[in-house]
Image (cartoon, rainbow, N blue to C red):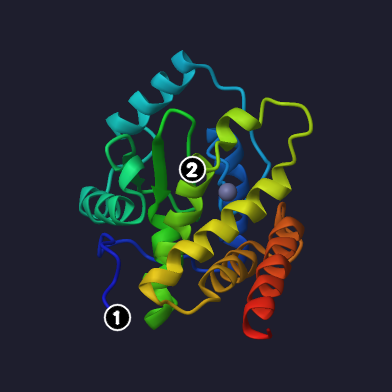
Amino acid sequence: MRRFLLPASRKPYSSARQCLTTTLSLGLMLGLSACATNPGAGRNNWDAAQLARREQRVTDGAIGSRNTDAETELRRQVCEIDRVACDAIRVYVVDRPEAQARLWPNDMLIFTNGLLRLINQTGSSAAAQLRFALAHELAHRQLGHFNRRHHAGWDADAAEREADAVAMESLRTSNPPPDSGIELLQLIIEQRGENSRGAERMRARIAAMRKRISREVVP
Ligand SMILES: [Zn+2]
């Protein structure tokens, strides 16, 4: 299985603890809370000017140097998954060690090399897991979550499960293993630690996906 367009010089984490520390400190500092990995966390009330400034920093490489080869490949996949969003989404892959992905309300999709690196470790499952991560982020847009989150009764955890369900459905056409999303979240939990921030929510998402798969397998 080829690697997903990562700079050859970068080394993976030397230990889970180092990764956890890096994830927490940098994640909080940058506000790059990961949607796929840390549901419901982080600010949701960015205004247009703040988002524009943030995107400028990403564009300039201030968050981390950009992996343009990976950006090209991910953009291609975004357009395969969601033709409607294709023209609007701007894909950035930044050289950050934490495993994160997030689609922002202004249609900037930020992936980290850390997430690509984690996915690469899975060998033959890597393509399906990458696909799941992209489809999950795009699902938030398709489901109107960026507008709905400002309304009363907004349930961030339910929104994550909804996005997982749409991602699972969209993967069906490319015939990947149905448990790609489960594997991906398990990897992230393993990397961050069983008791890390957001782990409990990710376990709930895994349980919901398992339930969905079992419903499909057993008539
Ligand atoms: Zn999400």
Residue behind mark 2? 142
Q: Say above or below: 50 vs 141.
A: above
Residue neighbourhood size for the residue with mark 2, other residues' Cα within 10 Å, grouped as few (<14), some (14–19), many (≥20): some
Q: Which mark sits nearer the N-terminus, 1 or 2?
A: 1
> Does the residue tagged 2 have its C-beta within 8 Å of any atom of ligand 1?
no
Secondary structure under tag 1 reads loop
Q: Position of residue 95 (x, y in %)?
A: 36, 48
Q: Say above or below: 105 vs 10.
A: above
Q: Say above or below: 181 vs 111.
A: below
Residue behind mark 1? 1
Residue neighbourhood size for the residue with mark 1, other residues' Cα within 10 Å, grouped as few (<14), some (14–19), many (≥20): few
Q: CA distance from mark 1 to mark 2?
A: 31 Å
Secondary structure under tag 2 reads helix
Task: For residue 181, say whether it is visible.
Answer: yes
Residue type, numbered disc 2: Gln
Residue type, numbered disc 1: Met
Q: Position of residue 13 (x, y in %)?
A: 48, 65
State the residue in front, 206 or 213: 213
Q: Which residue lies at the image location 29% right of the left edge and 56% below the top edge?
A: 80
State the residue in front, 20 or 72: 72
